[in-house]
Amino acid sequence: MDALYRLEADKLDIFLQSLGPDIYAPVKTDAIRFQKISSVKEADLTALADVPVKDFFFRQREQLFKFTKGKIATEIKDAPFRIFFGLRRCDLNAVKHQDFIFIEKYKDPYYTAQRKNTLLFGYHCDEALNKYCFCGSMGLEEYHDIMFFDKKKYFLLNPGSKVGQKIVSEAKLKRAGTLKKKDTIPKGTDRLEKKDISKLFENSLWEKGADECLSCSACTSLCPTCYCHEVKDDVKLSDLKSGERTREWSSCQLKSFTRVAGEHVFREKRVDRFKHRIYHQLVYFKERYGVNMCVGCGRCITHCPTTIDFVSLINKMK
Amino acid sequence: MKADYLPQSVKVLQKRDESADTFTLRLGMKVDHDPGQFIQVSIPGIGEAPISISSYSKDYLEISIRKVGNVTNALHGVKKGSSLFVRGPYGRGYQMSKLKGKGIVFIGGGCGVAPLKGAIEYVEKNRKDFKEIDLFLGFRSPGDILFTSRHKDWENHFNVHMSVDQIPSKTCYSGNVGFITDTLNKTPIQAKGTVAFICGPPIMMTKSIQLLAAKGFKDTQIYVSEEKLMYCAFGLCCHCMDKGNLTCLDGPVFRYDEIVRSRDGKA
């Protein structure tokens, strides 16, 4: 899967529109979010989307089942065919990690229903999009149906799946060389120097990071890979007998995350919660599943109200 | 493991109060399980809670519950003959068959005695497989003592040590008073060929581990049952994660050497 195909820049809109009605791309509104577009001109490809695509597949709030007077029933509907265009390498790998945990490991029917009719079209970063990017340190892989390399007057398309290959073939695009491995990694993104932080748990610099933390949970909300969630029931006020059980994103940065009977909180200290997020992302997930969870998108730094740069914090640790 | 949040409806066969705030439900569930495993019990509209299995029987499954929150309070209102929603059993419990030929010291505090009771009942049914059995059971006050109907049987088969932390005024009680860890401290125990099962409040567990270590117990001879907030019970929601260990999958019963790093500060 290293073949490249040429698509003229002025043909991009027609190419995308010919594939289906539901094309999603990053659009600048209050922030850059993925939303349905009618023309690629609406897409903002100048920066990393502020909000990742996670919510389209692992919904922020998802009904697990409905209950009515002691009976329960599930209603899982497949999402329609959708194409997501403009995904950066970090976000493609984030979807890969969510596919791994929800589909491969857990056969989660809710995530699968949202994800299965989806194509992932990447948009390659030649270099770091901002100074907090560190995807180059995270050992990312190729995970796209088609990756787009923007050459201004034209695009080079690299199909990464059978469906991607089929689309490129049916569009009768011309071969335009071969993709080299070194061209897939954005420049200036190898920022995290220490790859193993398991022995740094007692380092005093963690306190420094935690001192600036407000426990606002912006980091976990905007993280494309965080998948922690809680489960709760909602009842209809009309009869108090029917309602739904839902799962909803939760954040390890909040005390309520570990609160048990008797109001005991296991990670009472802010520094313990701060470290837990980073260790889950960089150590615990890898110990269990063999891969990093973090993809180095840097949103937890750029969108932190106090811009806690845990990457340079780790780099300073001795 | 499959992400399956859907519970099954099961009948409540029996309900009995154990103390002013703790009660036992016997459920019509015939499942293979290890003592120390737990189930997710729910009442739609109120919510779901993980509850330890407190029995060991092929014919039914019992859970003993203290009224401490929304779900447990609502469960107290459930009547014999009605239905509950249940998923499980989940987690790693006490792997009793691997401990054949050993003596066991049970150390339980308050409603922490409930998960131990399943293992105690296993030993009752397989008494010849185990050597000396000591039960150290501590409760807050005489009114909080649990499973009193079973105590006679236990005294016939095991060395039972029981104490209450305090006696409120105008209470008739002639047993031991003081922390159960004080009783444990004073009682000679042969560490060789013995394992310890501990479940109770964090402070009691920590103290018991120290006392056992002083008696010559290695970390590999100590099993603790942990309590954490959890939702999914199959390792996906990650709320019960402690230093990388998922309490719902890797526990709730841990051999102490497996989790010692989460207490001495290493990642």
Image (cartoon, coloured by chain):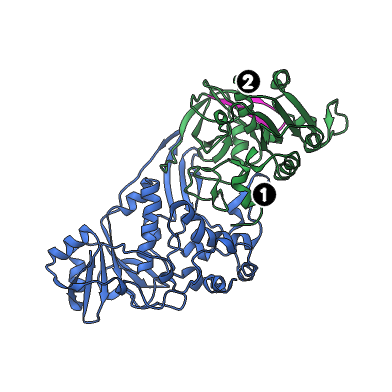
Chain colours: A blue, B green
Are discs 1 and 2 located on one and the same chain? no
Query: Per the image, is B176 magenta?
Result: no
Q: Decide if residue B213 is on the left or right side of residue A171.
A: right
Structural distance between the alpha carbons of marks 1 and 2: 37 Å
Residue A265 visible in this rendered orientation of the protein? yes
Classify mark 1: residues with Cα within 10 Å, few (<14), some (14-19) or many (20+). Answer: some
| Residue A65: percent from left, percent from top | 42, 42
Q: From this view, report whether residue A167 is shown above or below residue A41.
A: above
Question: Toward the viewer: B106 or B194?
Answer: B194
Residue B222 visible in this rendered orientation of the protein? no
Q: Quadrant of residue B196?
A: top right
Q: From this view, report whether residue A12 is shown above or below residue A270.
A: below
The amino acid pointed to by label 1 is His
Q: From this view, report whether residue A21 is shown above or below residue B28.
A: below
Q: Chain of mark 2?
A: B
Question: Toward the viewer: A206 or A8?
Answer: A206
Residue under pointer 2: B127
Q: Quadrant of residue A22?
A: bottom left
Residue under pointer 1: A264
| Residue B219: percent from left, percent from top | 65, 43
Which stretch is magenta?
A: B16-27
Q: From this view, report whether residue A51 is shown above or below residue B251.
A: below
| Residue B14: percent from left, percent from top | 59, 22
Can you tell which mark lies on residue B141? none
The amino acid pointed to by label 2 is Arg
User: Do labels 1 and 2 touch, CB within 8 Å?
Assistant: no
Q: Secondary structure at mark 2?
A: helix
